[in-house]
Image (cartoon, rainbow, N blue to C red):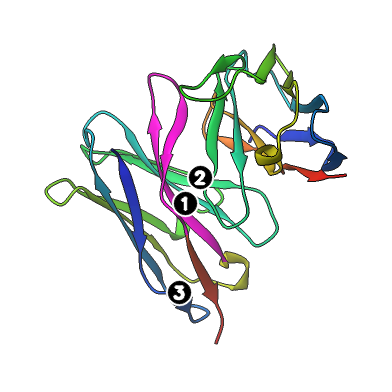
Amino acid sequence: QVQLQETGPGLVKPSETLSLTCTVSGGSFTTYFWTWIRQPPGKGLECIGYIYYGGSTNYNPSLESRLTISVDTSKKQFSLQLTSVTAADTAVYYCARYDYRGNFFDYWGQGILVTVSS
Amino acid sequence: DIQMTQSPSSLSASVGDRVTITCRASQSVSIHVNWYQQKPGKAPKLLIHTASTLYSGVPSRFSGTGSGTDFTLTLSSLQPEDFATYHCQQSYITPWTFGQGTKVEIK
């Protein structure tokens, strides 16, 4: 049974860095893209970016200048860092597994609400 | 980025109704569209991939059609557990993008 779990602070101050980690249990870690997706309150879903186990990444151009996604294969974890946050970055952040053979997201974490506020 | 536009944004329906949700892409995405169901406070769940393929374990009352720029998700007979928000997503080119969602409510 594949499970993903997001962890990190639920409150971040403006201009600071948002940091989240996703821990994967079950299944292979080496044959999928590991993705971050966010959903502002009452709004649609936005793909932030993904990483492959070998470290190659693909970022949403709208966030690329502030974004770093990294991976620790020994712990089956991948992480998100988003710098210089503003209130517009307030959202539920999900980690998800992307099956690149089928081209879909098949497993998701439960999501973590991150609020940017002083 | 490819923009995905869903219609309607919300609808009210009764148990047993046939419901159709449409999704239009701003450029051709071939058949690379997926549909997800999301309930309040929960993560989305995959229903349909590659426009029309039912994902494992999803009831057959869900179906999808389309190619190019126009896609539809149909629920043939709405069940109580189907009241939720539905999202389309294109996997043709990064950044992968979603529609704004269609909320299906009880009439």
Q: Amino acid at mark 1?
A: Glu
Circle 1 is placed at which residue position? A64
> Residue at left 57%, top 58%?
B41
Q: Is residue A24 left or right of residue B8?
A: left
Q: Amino acid at mark 2?
A: Asn
What x and y, as percent, mark residue A100? 38, 24
- Disc number for residue A60: 2
Q: Which residues are magenta?
A: A91-111
A89 or B37: nearer the viewer: B37
Mark pair 1, 3: CA separation: 22 Å
Circle 3 is placed at which residue position? A10
Q: Chain of mark 1?
A: A
> Residue at left 44%, top 54%?
A110
> Residue at left 22%, top 37%?
A29
Q: Secondary structure at mark 1?
A: helix
Outermost residue toward the bottom? A118
Q: Are marks 2 and 1 in contact (CB under 8 Å)?
A: yes
What x and y, as percent, mark residue A74? 11, 48
